[in-house]
């Protein structure tokens, strides 16, 4: 199995994603979308399919009729009906007469003739997808331990059980379940590649909001370029960027907060007037309000943290529109839309709770983490904690100092913090000046700046809050990626002012060309000065060889005809096709008489060099995409939080080595048996015992035991047995 296998799997996920997220709603809701702007169609498509998939799957599950066949009939049936309807209305079968080659040529011609802004935007999106997808091609394991849980929940949906892990927003799981049911795409491949593709939607949503903030049309391109290439100095920013690679509910829903803010401010700024006194119907039919409702519904159905982020972002804009917000004509429809969004998203969860399903335990964890104790405990382990301001900093001067030290400086270092504060100060001064004495055209330039400035200040305060003794609204640095995006936009305020002023003296075409060169210049400058961002990491939990051997076995052997003996990491990738025996269970039982496997084929995965489990494995790659620099930045801080793991820079991997001496040792006993896999000394003993057993079994049954795969780090043993003569797995 080679790189082409993963390229094909990536292509499958990309095709299914584009079909379900864009083509399906474009056909089914073609009448509604006809004549709408590109922004409207994009926002509609990236929210409606997610809401529909989540609602349909969960409601079918509530009535215990969830089955892949029903999903296929439902979604394909609706698609075909509307497709045929559109064909009849336009020109019967005209689309069939057009060759695929002709269609592709037409698409390419439209792209080639499109606005240069969209070409540059397309290049930025492709670069972002490459950067955030790169790790999945270098490391073929999940990359983050939470994905095992999410795979389990998706498997529950495949079994017809919703909320199998307890009540929790499951829109992302339902979306992946639909991709699996409609296109046969492996859940494993979806979890591996989906977020690297979906990050383009996040970038586009950010771009659309920045278009509302900045005056010069091309400044959002500067902000996106800076976010995608600039180096970061803080460990939490590295962690936040790392999460953008991983298919997690929070990251899957990040785009919705930008859309919520975009359409809220558009709704509050519109100039609609009621037709008759006392009538609110005109406001209720506002397209901006409708898209706000859809975006908020998607946010609530994906992850509760996204809703909190959306609230912070929306509040930053709404506070400057209070008169419009609390007017009777706008507030009542807005409040009604919020209530409707919550009802739509929460109805399946309420139904499950009423049926006796409890909340998922992570809800309790998130609530408990809000006191900030976990973050403060980590900070206290830092070597320079004595240099930081005293906790419980409730005096205003201490809060300001703490926000700088624990916020700006912690994230960006002294130099970066100074640049950001300088941009913030310049933006505030310009806004005040334009409001007092400047002409109207200057007021128009900075009209969108105050919400951006306020949001960035709120983000840094919320980040620093637990370190200052305040509650932690959003835990574990999960706000960092979005906060970083908006802070990079803040840095572009002087550029926006400059281009907006120059447009009064130069032709637009000249400034457009200068803007395109500026985007390229941001990349070239960061590359030449050594400030290009670094490669990110995956949490390494198994060798690539183990992944590839697992896939090879799945392709070559019939379903449920084989068992794989290994740590838990092979369980969910094979749960639909194979039996799995935990390596710890196997080692514990091989001393029992009569211990056997019922499967015809048995595979034993053994690490000759046991991995330091979940080590942060930083990638390597071409220098034009990223540089090698983040390992020490990240691990200097997170080694305190994860002392039993480690960090490694490719191509080196942190691992021990098995031996006969290790095989003779007794396994440590832990209250949590999972530690036998995650603690390297225990894992080494476990793998050594497994290898020793395989060697002895091979000597007892030399004609029917073989090495299925072997390299320097990993080996897979295999034997076959008949139902009438199962092997006794006990060896002396």
Image: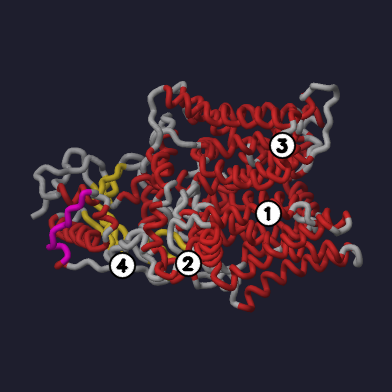
Which residue lies at the image location 55% right of the left edge and 46% below the top edge? Answer: 252
**Residue carrying label 1:** 452
* Between 162 and 725, the one nearer to me in the picture: 162
Q: Earlier in the sequence, mark 3 or mark 1?
A: 3
Asked which secondary structure carries label 3, the reply is: helix
- Please name which of the two marks, 2 or 1, marks the residue nearer to the observer: 1
The residue at the point 66 percent across, 52 percent down is 206
Indicate which label's residue lies in the foreground, 3 or 1.
Answer: 3
Image coordinates for residue 701, horizontal then vertical, percent: 16, 55
Disc 2 to disc 1: CB gap under 8 Å: no
Q: Earlier in the sequence, mark 1 or mark 4?
A: 1
Q: Which mark is residue 325?
A: 3
Q: Residues within 10 Å of mark 1 (few under 14, many from 20)?
A: many
Separation of marks 1 and 4 at Cα, in angstroms: 46 Å
**Label 4 near label 3: C-beta < 8 Å?**
no
Q: Nearer the viewer, mark 1 or mark 4?
A: 1
Q: Residue at left 62%, top 32%?
A: 338
Q: Dot 1: what SS?
A: helix
């Amino acid at each position: 199995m080679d790189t082409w296998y993963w390229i094909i799997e990536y292509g499958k996920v990309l095709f299914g994603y584009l079909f379900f997220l864009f083509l399906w709603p474009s056909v089914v809701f073609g009448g509604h979308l006809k004549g709408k702007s590109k922004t409207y169609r994009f926002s509609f498509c990236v929210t409606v399919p997610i809401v529909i998939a989540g609602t349909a799957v969960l409601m079918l599950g509530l009535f215990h009729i969830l089955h892949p066949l029903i999903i296929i009939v439902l979604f394909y049936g609706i698609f075909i009906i509307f497709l045929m309807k559109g064909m009849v209305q336009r020109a019967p079968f005209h689309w069939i007469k057009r060759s695929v080659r002709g269609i592709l040529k037409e698409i390419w011609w439209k792209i080639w003739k499109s606005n240069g802004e969209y070409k540059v935007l397309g290049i930025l999106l492709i670069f972002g997808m490459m950067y955030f997808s790169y790790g999945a091609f270098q490391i073929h394991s999940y990359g983050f331990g939470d994905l095992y849980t999410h795979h389990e929940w998706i498997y529950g949906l495949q079994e017809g059980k919703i909320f199998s892990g307890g009540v929790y927003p499951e829109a992302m799981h339902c979306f992946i379940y639909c991709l699996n049911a409609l296109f046969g795409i492996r859940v494993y491949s979806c979890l591996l590649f989906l977020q690297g593709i979906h990050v383009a939607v996040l970038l586009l949503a950010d771009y659309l909001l920045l278009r509302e903030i900045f005056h010069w049309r091309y400044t959002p391109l500067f902000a996106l370029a800076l976010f995608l290439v600039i180096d970061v100095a803080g460990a939490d920013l590295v962690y936040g960027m790392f999460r953008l690679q991983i298919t997690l509910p929070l990251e899957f829903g990040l785009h919705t907060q930008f859309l919520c803010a975009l359409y809220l401010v558009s709704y509050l700024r519109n100039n609609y007037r009621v037709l008759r006194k006392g009538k609110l119907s005109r406001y209720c039919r506002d397209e901006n309000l409708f898209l706000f409702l859809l975006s908020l519904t998607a946010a609530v159905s994906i992850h509760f943290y996204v809703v909190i982020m959306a609230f912070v972002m929306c509040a930053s804009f709404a506070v400057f529109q209070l008169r419009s917000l609390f007017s009777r004509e706008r507030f009542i429809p807005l409040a009604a839309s919020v209530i409707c969004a919550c009802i739509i998203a929460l109805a399946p969860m309420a139904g499950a709770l009423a049926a006796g399903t409890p909340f998922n335990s992570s809800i309790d964890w998130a609530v408990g983490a809000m006191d900030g104790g976990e973050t403060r405990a980590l900070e206290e382990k830092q070597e320079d904690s004595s240099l930081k301001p005293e906790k419980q900093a409730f005096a205003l001067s201490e809060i300001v100092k703490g926000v700088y030290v624990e916020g700006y400086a912690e994230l960006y270092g002294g130099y970066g913090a100074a640049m950001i504060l300088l941009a913030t100060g310049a933006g505030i001064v310009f806004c005040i000046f334009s409001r007092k004495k400047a002409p109207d055209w200057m007021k128009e330039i900075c009209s969108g700046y105050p919400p951006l400035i306020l949001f960035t200040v709120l983000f840094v305060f919320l980040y620093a809050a637990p370190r200052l003794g305040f509650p932690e609204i959003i835990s574990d640095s999960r706000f960092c990626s979005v906060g970083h995006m908006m802070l990079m936009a803040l840095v572009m305020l002087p550029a926006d002012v400059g281009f907006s002023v120059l447009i009064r003296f130069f032709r637009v075409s000249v400034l457009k060309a200068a803007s395109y060169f500026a985007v390229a210049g941001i990349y070239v400058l960061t590359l030449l000065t050594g400030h290009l961002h670094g490669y990110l990491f995956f949490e390494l939990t198994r060798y690539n060889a183990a992944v590839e051997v697992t896939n090879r076995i799945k392709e070559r052997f019939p379903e449920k005809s084989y068992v794989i003996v290994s740590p838990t990491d092979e369980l969910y990738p094979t749960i639909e096709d194979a039996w799995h025996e935990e390596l710890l269970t196997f080692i514990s039982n091989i001393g029992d008489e009569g211990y056997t496997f019922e499967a015809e084929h048995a595979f034993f995965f053994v690490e000759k060099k046991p991995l330091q489990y979940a080590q942060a494995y930083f990638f390597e790659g071409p220098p034009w995409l990223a540089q090698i620099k983040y390992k020490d930045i990240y691990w200097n801080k997170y080694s305190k939080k994860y002392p039993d793991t480690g960090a490694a820079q490719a191509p080196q991997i942190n691992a021990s080595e098995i031996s006969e001496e290790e095989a003779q040792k007794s396994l440590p006993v832990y209250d949590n048996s999972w530690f036998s896999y995650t603690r390297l000394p225990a894992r080494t003993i476990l793998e050594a015992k497994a290898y020793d057993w395989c060697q002895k079994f091979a000597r007892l049954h030399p004609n029917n035991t073989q090495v299925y795969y072997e390299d320097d780090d990993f080996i897979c043993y295999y034997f076959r047995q008949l139902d009438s003569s199962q092997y006794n797995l006990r060896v002396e």
